Image (cartoon, helix red, strand yellow):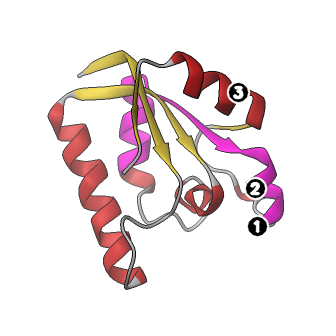
Amino acid sequence: MKIDRDLLLMLKSSELGAGEPDLGIKLMSAFLDSLYASGKLPARISCLNSGIFLTTEGSPVEDILRKFEEAGSEIVSCGTCLKYYDRADKLIIGEASNMKVTVNDMLNFEKILAP
C-alpha cells in the first residue's frame, strides 16, 4: 500500500450518492473497499457532517477504515459535527478536528477526492 501524500479524501456524508439510505451505505462501503484495493491511499480522510457516522460507534465501514488507518492514512472527524450529532464520546476511529484544519487541508492538498 502506498500513501499518496497529495491526496485528501473528504467524506461529507455517511452514504454515497442521493437516494435510498441502504443503497447509499452499500455504495460507500464498496467505494472504500475499492479505493483501498487500488493501493493508492489518501494521506488524510476527513469526515464532515453525517460522514462522522463512519468513524463513530455503529459505523458500517469500521473494518475498512481501520485498514486505511493501519496502512498510514490519518483519519479526522469534524468536532462541531460530532457535538451536533451528540457523538463526541462515541468516536472510535481517528481523532476530532476543526474547521481550521479542514480549510487548511482543502487549500494545501493538491488532490481532493470527494465522492
The residue at 34%/61% (across/down) is: 28
* Residue behind mark 1: 85
Q: Are marks 1 and 2 in contact (CB under 8 Å)?
A: yes
Residue 68 position within the rendered picture, expressed as x and y whole percent measured from the top left: 38, 35
Is residue 12 toward the left or the right of residue 96 in the image? Answer: left
Viewport quadrant of the N terminus: top left
Residue 101 seen: yes
- Residue bearing the label numbered 3: 101
Residue 65 magenta-drawn?
yes
What type is the residue that disc 3 sits on?
Answer: Val
Q: Nearer the viewer, mark 3 or mark 2?
A: 3
Q: Nearer the viewer, residue 64 or 109?
A: 109
Residue that carries the numbered disc 2 in the rendered image: 82
Classify residue 105 as left or right of residue 96.
left
Question: SS for tag 3?
Answer: helix
The percent coordinates of residue 88 (x first, y second) are: 79, 54
Give the left or right position of residue 29, taking residue 75 as reference: left
Q: CA distance from mark 1 to mark 2?
A: 5 Å
Q: Quadrant of residue 56?
A: bottom right
Task: Tell which residue pokes out farthest to the front in this image.
Answer: 107
Instruction: Measure the C-alpha gap from mark 3 to mark 1.
Output: 20 Å
Instruction: Give the percent coordinates (x, y) of residue 80.
Output: 81, 50
The residues colored magenta run 64-85
